[in-house]
Amino acid sequence: MPIDLHMHSTASDGTDAPAALAKLAAEAGLSAIALTDHDTTAGLAECAKACKRRKLTFVPGIELSTERGKPRGALHLLGYHIREDAPALRAVIDELQEARRMRNPQIVESLQKLGVDITLDEIAAEAGEAGASGSATIGRPHIAAVLVRKGYAKSIQDAFRRYIGFGAPAYARKDNLAPQRGIEAIHEAGGVAVLAHPVQLKCEDDTELQQLVAQLVRAGLDGLEIWHSDHTPAMVDQYRRLAERYELIVTGGSDYHGLRKQIAIGSQAVPDDVLASLAASSKSA
Ligand code: AMP
Ligand code: ZN
Ligand code: FE
Ligand code: FE
């Protein structure tokens, strides 16, 4: 049976509660899911419980926002089979949340200066209950959603392009984590570190991607996400060869975000033998 190892809940920028993801996954005929919210583990316990009720295999995960020291250098790291109470992981999550608490008000201030009627409270409300409780992740997708709802942008994409994306007038950078530290934190939590959606790294060519992967492998990277909604079949083949070359395990998932993106849960054909490779590389599974 197919599996889906990349999805977001209301604990970050998805629109389904963690328990609702288990229901959707069961209805889609999946045998296993991983919850990989941005920079938070707040949804894991609820999702694990709901998966157990539905006899779905659950892999506790996270998607860490790291930065590779160049403009537009976002690098997302997936951590699987993490122990969420591991001190090194908690420290990194606290840092990432603090960076958001610094940045989000800067974005709001810039927007207000541009004449946009928007407040931090509205953004917290958009992020929902989870956001208000302080344990969840509030990010630009929530800000973009408010901009769309209030008529300042036609779509989420348009909001990023006109206001908050890189190079746009209300863009603000956030202090981000070095990928090496993200990998270390995942390992110290007994987890498996996987480079998410390589296409989003926007590498100039194969060589740049290869060099980056080689560098991450030296830092301890365990796997490569080859199946993803942004990857064409040709990319899946290219990334599979790259994974073979560096002896990385391969993983994949839809990156389902509920109503915020046009992506269906379970829409990537990820084979269930990936679960065994993940468990074998993990120190906590
Ligand atoms: P944040 O981590 O709060 O800075 O938000 C980053 C998230 O915003 C990414 O994970 C993407 O899902 C989303 N994002 C970034 N750039 C764009 C864009 N140009 N259009 C739509 N979504 C974007
Ligand atoms: Zn997201
Ligand atoms: Fe991502
Ligand atoms: Fe994601």
Image: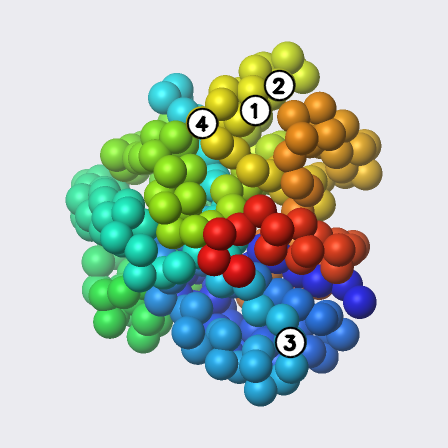
Q: CA distance from mark 3 to mark 4?
A: 33 Å
Sequence-earlier tag: 4 or 2: 2
Quadrant containing the N terminus in the rendered view: bottom right
Q: Label 1's element?
A: helix
Q: Quadrant of residue 167?
A: top left
Which residue, given by chain and number where applicable, does mark 3 sit on? 56
Residue closest to the eye, 270 or 11: 270
Q: Tags 2 and 1 in contact by the CB under 8 Å rule?
A: yes
At which x and y percent is residue 97?
Answer: 25, 51
Q: CA distance from mark 2 to mark 3?
A: 35 Å
Using the image as rendered, state which of residue 199 and residue 169 is in the foreground. 199
Determine crowd level at label 3: few under 14, some 14-19, many 20+ residues with C-alpha closer than 10 A.
many
Q: Which residue is mark 1?
A: 213
Q: Which residue is mark 2?
A: 210
Q: Which of the two discs, 3 and 4, labels the residue nearer the N terminus? A: 3
**Residue mark closest to the camera, 1 vs 4:** 4
Name the spot of residue 165 as percent of width and height, x first.
Answer: 41, 36
Amino acid tagged 1: Val
Under mark 2, the amino acid is Gln
Q: Residue at x 77, y 63 (%)?
A: 2
Rendered residue at 41%/69% (across/down): 43
Number of marks in the rendered image: 4
Q: State whether residue 12 is above or below residue 91.
A: below
Is 27 placed left or right of 143 in the picture?
A: right
Q: Which mark is residue 219?
A: 4
Q: Position of residue 222 (x, y in %)?
A: 56, 38
- Tell me the crowding category of disc 4: few under 14, some 14 to 19, or many 20 or more residues within 10 angstroms, Cα based: some
